[in-house]
Amino acid sequence: MTKVNITINGQQLEVDASMTILEAAESAGIEIPTFCHDPELTRVGACRICVVEVAGARNLPAACTTPVSEGMVIETESERVIKARRVNLQLIWANHPQDCLTCEKTGSCKLQDYSYRYNVTGSPYQGEAKVFELDNTNPFFFRDLNKCIYCGKCVRKCFEVNGAGAIEFMYRGFNSKVTTAFDVPLEESSCVMCGMCVDVCPVGALTPLQGLHNNRPWEVEKVLTTCPYCGCGCTYYLHVKNDKIVGLTPNFEGPLKGHMCVKGRFGWDFVDSPDRLKTPLIKKDGEFVEATWDEALDLVASKFKEVRAQYGPDAIAGLSSARTTNEENYLFQKLLRSLGTNNVDHCARL
Ligand code: SF4
Ligand code: SF4
Ligand code: SF4
């Protein structure tokens, strides 16, 4: 790998020649703000919050799209850079509701964080403001396009990673917005409700409906776990507050890089459902009644014996599940084979 020597904020570094300024800075632990950048997506350099000063360059290049070169001298927090970032933020605030007090994104919002970092409290730019109706037409998340900052991450995630291509920028200039083809509700588009757009949105434009108004990011404990639905084994963080699950974040560091389907992403509220079984039930006189595990297991064992004695072991079959672990499935087939049958199958999908 070809290397180049560069200087960032006075720090001399030898980095891969294939890197961008942003990647080189990150490799040295120097954080440059970004809205539209995602290492998994095409680089677009659209939001301009990552501009940096490069000695000898007339303008301020975007760190996420500018490759490093031999001898480059870069300043990531110079006076000029900070001024440009402040103007950038003020332009966003010129058409952004000041809703931080009640916004679900408070505490994990990049616009809020960078405004705090660069002491931007609003916008000196006055003019016509766009007003979009809140879109709560799907059961999983709502879209508040008044808070959209046009980073385009949702669009690229949906197209480049999910492949659904359900959303795009529509209309031009002042009228542009992220929406579906023909501006129909998401439910009527090719959207599969995977929620990936929600998870990459840097602001409060896309918000899960679950856990609304009952938790803040600093109030929850994030517990890493594995999705129980299918055999893919996606991992994610459950947000736990007062021993209750109130939300979920995909595990972007895991092997599947945070990709999830609608079941895993939004289908976790069954955990606290009052309909869940807590004890075995045995039907007596046409009614299910609660039983102990010993009673239930004795009953199942006696029924197996009856069936085997009357019809032979091939009359018994076992259907397991991809929701269980490899070890549980191994034990399951051992159990069935110990009863004399090889009739073992499973439902790979639900
Ligand atoms: S999206 Fe961010 S900046 Fe906008 S209101 Fe919500 S928390 Fe505040
Ligand atoms: S939920 Fe998934 S499929 Fe639907 S718009 Fe978002 S990224 Fe695309
Ligand atoms: S909805 Fe969110 S992710 Fe999509 S363009 Fe707007 S701010 Fe970016």
Image (cartoon, rainbow, N blue to C red):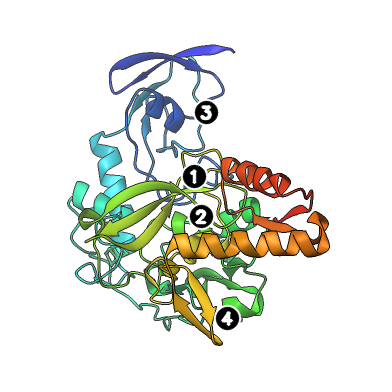
- The structure residue drawn at horizontal position 21% and vertical position 61%, both measured from the top left corner, is 242
Q: Are marks 2 and 3 in contact (CB under 8 Å)?
A: no
Q: Is mark 2 within 8 Å of ligand 3?
A: yes
Q: Tell me if residue 331 comes above or below residue 283 in the rendering.
A: above
Q: x and y percent of residue 72 in the render?
A: 43, 19
Look at the image and tell me in which quarter the C terminus lies.
bottom right
Tag 1 residue? 38
Determine if residue 194 is in view.
no
Which numbered tag is attached to residue 185? 4
Tag 2 residue? 153
Q: x and y percent of residue 108 in the render?
A: 29, 55
Tag 3 residue? 67
Left or right: where 316 falls relative to 253: right
Left or right: where 316 falls relative to 102: right
Crowd tier of the residue under label 2, counting other residues whose Cα lies within 10 Å: few below 14, some 14–19, many 20 or above: many
The amino acid marked with disc number 1 is Asp
Q: Hey, which quadrant is residue 10 in on the image?
A: top left
Look at the image and tell me in which quarter the N terminus lies.
top right
**Label 2 or label 3, whichever comes before in sequence order:** 3
